[in-house]
Structures are given as C-alpha cells and as structure tokens.
Image: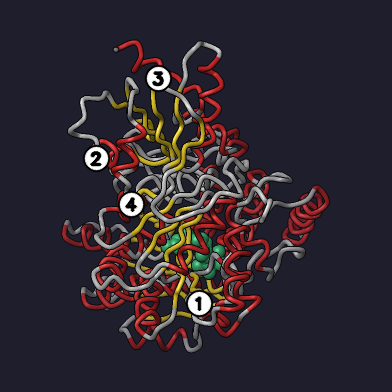
Amino acid sequence: MRTSDSLRKTYGETLVELGKDNKDIVMLEADLGNSTMSAMFGAAYPDRYFQVGIAEQNMASVAAGLSLAGKIPFINSFAVFATGRGYDQIRSSVAIASLNVKICGSSAGLSDFGDGKTHQSIDDIALMQVLPNMTVLSPCDAIETEKMAKAMVECDGPIYLRINRNDLPLVSDPKANYKIGQMTEMVQGKDVVVFATGVMVQQSMEAAKILEKEGISIRVVNVSTIKPLDIDALESFCDGVKGVVTAEEHSIIGGLGSAVCSALSNKRLPIEVLGVQDRFGTSAENYSILLKNFGLESEDVAKKVRKILADN
Amino acid sequence: MNYSQEQVTKLKKKAIQVRANILEMIPPGKVGHLGGSSSIADVMAALYFHAMNVNASDPKDSKRDRLIMSKGHAVLVQYACLVEFGYFSREELGKVKTFKGMLQGHPDMDKTPGIEAVTGSLGQGLSVALGLALGFRLDKLPNHVYAILGDGELAEGQVWEAVMAAHGFKANNLTAIVDFNGLQATSTTKEIFPIENLAQKWSSFGWNVIEIDGHNMVQILDALEAAKAFTEGPSVILAHTIKGKCFPFAEGKAKYHNAAMTEDEYKEAWACIENLKKEVEA
Ligand SMILES: Cc1ncc(C[n+]2csc(CCOP(=O)(O)OP(=O)(O)O)c2C)c(N)n1
C-alpha cells in the first residue's frame, strides 16, 4: 500500500509495478512524461515506452493500433489534451471498436492552477462519458488511484482515468476491496446525500463535519466511477434523504451532476449540482484560491445542503 | 538593409530589456517558462521594436501587424515586449499568473491588451495566423501576420495542415518563425522525433525558407525584411537559438523549460543582464 498523497506519483509507481509481470503493458506519452509521471515507466522499461512528441492525436490512434496488436496501451497527457486534442481519434479509432486503450489525463479540473484556462480541464468527463463503450474513472485520492490503475489492466476496453495534479489527503480505506463501477459511502448520514468525485470527496467529508455542528447529518458517497454509473446503488443511497447534492471539479454541464440528474430523473427528489459554473478557468497563484473562487470548498457543499433543507 | 548600426544597437538594448522584464515576472520560487521565452527574445525584440507595425498608443489600431504566439507557454517574452508600449503597467509583471492579474499563464486576448489570440494548446497558432492573413488579403489590407512556433510544437499534425494550406493559398502576407532551440519539455527535439533537414521539409511544402542565427540581430532583421519582400507565398524563418539564452545556468537545459529559479540563480541572472548591458555599451 502506497502512502503518498500524490495521485500522479502513485499512478506512475503502480504502472511500473504492473509492467514488471505484464509485458503487454505499453506506455505512450506526448512530451509531458515528467508531469504525468509516465516517465517512470519509461525509465524502467524503455522498450515499452513510446515518446511520440507533442502529437496527441497520433498518440491516440497509435494506441489503437497497439491494442489491435494485443498490447495494453496507456496514453498520457494533461487531461485537457489527452481527451480534447485527440477527441475524434479516441472516438473513431478507440471507442467505436471498444479497443483496450487506457487514457490517463493528469492535471484534471483546475489543478493546473498557474497555466490557466487553456490547460485546465473542466470538460473532460463530459467528453469521455458521452462516448459509448468508454469507462470514466475519477479517484478521490492516491489509494484509490493505485487500485484503479490495477483494475484498469484487468478490465478489457477503453477507460479514461482523470487525476489531480496536486496532492490530496488520503481519505479512502486502504483495506477495502475495489471494483470498477462501485460507489463508496464515506460518511454515514440521513438528511441529505452528497454524491462527490475527485477532490470534492474530501471537501464533502469536511462539509459533513461543518454540518454536524449544526445538527445536520449528511451521507457522503464517493462516486469514483462516473461511467458506468451504478444506478441501483445510486438509488439506494437516496433512501430516506430529503435531497441530493452532487459535487465535482468539472463543469456543471456534462459531468457527474448531469449523470446523476438523468439517472434520478424519475425520482421526486430535489437535486443541487455543485461544480464549475458554465465558464472557463483562470490562472492563480495556488490551487486553493481557485477552489475558493470557483465555489468548490467544503462550505460551498454545506450551503447546497442547507439550501435543500430550507426548501423542504 | 533598411536600418542603421545605431538601430541595431538600439534593438540589442531592447532585447536585453525584454530579458530583464522576463526576470521580473519570475522571481525566485515562481515557476515560469524561462527557457523558451529567452530563446526567442532577440527575434521578438526585432519584431516588436522594428519590423512590425505596432501603435504604441493603441493596441487595437486596425493598421497593426499581428503576432500569434503559437508556442503560448512562452508568453512571458510577449508580455515583456508589450509592457514597453505601455499597454499595461509594469506592476502587472509582478502579478503574472495570479488570480487578480491580467497576465495569464497562457495568451488570453480578452484579458491582455496586445495579445491577438488564445493559444497554449500547441499546434494551432499557425492556422489562426493563416486565417488572419487570408482575411486581410480579402479586404486588400497590407497587414502582415507573424506566427511564432516551437520546434517541439512541429510534431503536431495540424502545423503541417496549415503549412500545406498556406502554400496552397499563396499566403504571402504570412511569416512563420520557428524557435529552433532543439529542446522541448522533456528532452531534445532530435531525440523525440526526426527533425533533420527542417529547411528541406518546409521548402518541399512550397515555403520560402530563411535560415538564421536567431541571436544575431543583423541576421534577424535581414530575414524579417526578406520574408516580407517575398511575394510569391508564405515565408518561414528557421531561427537557430539556444534555450535559456543569456542565462548560462539555464542555457540548453530542458529543466528550465518551466522551472523556478533559486535565489542564487536569480541573482546570477540579473548579473548576466548587467554584463550584457555593458557589452552593448562598449
Ligand atoms: C497540445 C499541447 N500538448 C502539450 C502541451 C504541453 N507543453 C507546453 S510547452 C511544451 C514543449 C514545447 O516545446 P517547443 O515547442 O520546442 O517550445 P520551446 O522549447 O521553444 O519552449 C509542451 C509539451 C501543450 N501546451 N499543448
């Protein structure tokens, strides 16, 4: 079990470990390997590492070819380039044929704070979950990242993994079994259920503490598989609550919020969607300034919960 | 050769000032693209303070030439030029990449006067520049368009789509400039993809190719003039440069692609600026 707070480093280390026994694993990257940490794989297994240069479209389709040859290719870049720059290649070469290509987008959400809007990824979940056959994973911490990387190799088919550039505190249970598709209850509660993903899991757990002092009890559920969404589990976590909040570091359009809203559309439950409003990111001196100004802090989650209860 | 020795000296001084402005934006501990900004600083100085038609009192003057910073990560060098026209206050330099600042991590035309497009996702700037050039030609306007590209950036297929299209459209009001510093983010360009015979590659696509030492002011000025004078189609200037130029601790090192300087390095960098100033005066 790894104890690093870095999702990227954990991803890199886990793939090095997996690559030792599984010689089919190959890595591709587009001149960002030191940042995505795919370079660790390159250092360990240079012959199974393809540095394609700044050419994400080519990378995606070459990966499709490698998978046709029986390999398990992982493609790596910033989330914004991995998904957006090669979108049609992922759609046509990879997803339609449901090839066994793994896509890792690091620096997802607003986490690339300094580089600003061109580098911040608020639409990657939308782009990837709209594709049939694509699985979309969004870990809440490094523990989950490690388990996901392992599960990705076990599972045949195209998978997108989005990870944060910044360190996140370890909040998930290292001993718990992991399976792609599951959602996990992180905090038990009864008044409102918060479905959160990525960095917002930790923020929602903080919100639970804030609200507890006010006599409000929330259930926090980590939805780390955005697609396929386990609708039965989703519905059962809604049992007995007065409403639902979704929380994600992604646009409120096309992300977890949209997925939950359509899944629960026949339920008579109020839903509040918390995420990046319909706007692009911006540069900032650090990550927390952005989380604060884009309304992605624990207090913002708490506000949504209070709103649901007040409207009740 | 439409310039005097005096002008060359003036431009060399401007290039030093540009590098000094870059330093102001990345004090010790602050991450910034020092390498790719300083490699193209001499060319940028020649463009903004000589070759391009730029109006110091109006960043939106319709007669202005356009510069598209396709290698958007090196926008610090562009901010360093623009501040000299007073398009924004020198105070903004200290606020680059901050939440309140108008100088973003990558070029943002809505936030920064003098920035002409949004770039940062590599490989798109030459296409934008081509579109601008075609638009000007349709309107029979004399404005010239420049695009600054990185050599690593040339791996993007879209660059070559634009290269072919610009030739097809005979876009003679378009000049591409490749900052041929041989390095990209993780390693040397040569190691990453075959970039030999670059001049041949461009010329086989129908471009007028001019190859220069991108740190030699006279060669830069001659090249810019020749590119503009060539009226049969688009021109490309392959500017051989050194990543991190003028800052020996950073020269030719991939590490300084996007890094923070230590206190000592920062001091050393300013000492380099002082030395350069003395050299030019002599
Ligand atoms: C589409 C895209 N992929 C990746 C990046 C990340 N990135 C920024 S700069 C850079 C290296 C650029 O190298 P080069 O074009 O040679 O520029 P220079 O060395 O002159 O700075 C990379 C990979 C990006 N900005 N855009």
Element assignment for label 3: loop
* Chain ID at mark 3: A
Q: Which residue is mark 1?
A: A25
Q: CA distance from mark 4 to mark 2?
A: 11 Å
The answer to whether marks 3 and 4 mark residues whose Cβ atoms lie closer than 8 Å is no
Element assignment for label 1: strand
Q: Which residue is mark 3?
A: A191
- In the rendered structure, which amino acid carries the disc numbered 1? Ile
- In the rendered structure, which amino acid carries the disc numbered 3? Asp
- B106, above or below A269, in the image: below
Q: Residue at x 55, y 27 (%)?
A: A206
Q: Residue at x 56, y 13 (%)?
A: A213
Among all residues in the image, which is located at the extreme right? B264
Q: Which residue is mark 4?
A: A227
Q: CA distance from mark 1 to mark 4?
A: 23 Å
Q: Which residue is mark 2?
A: A263
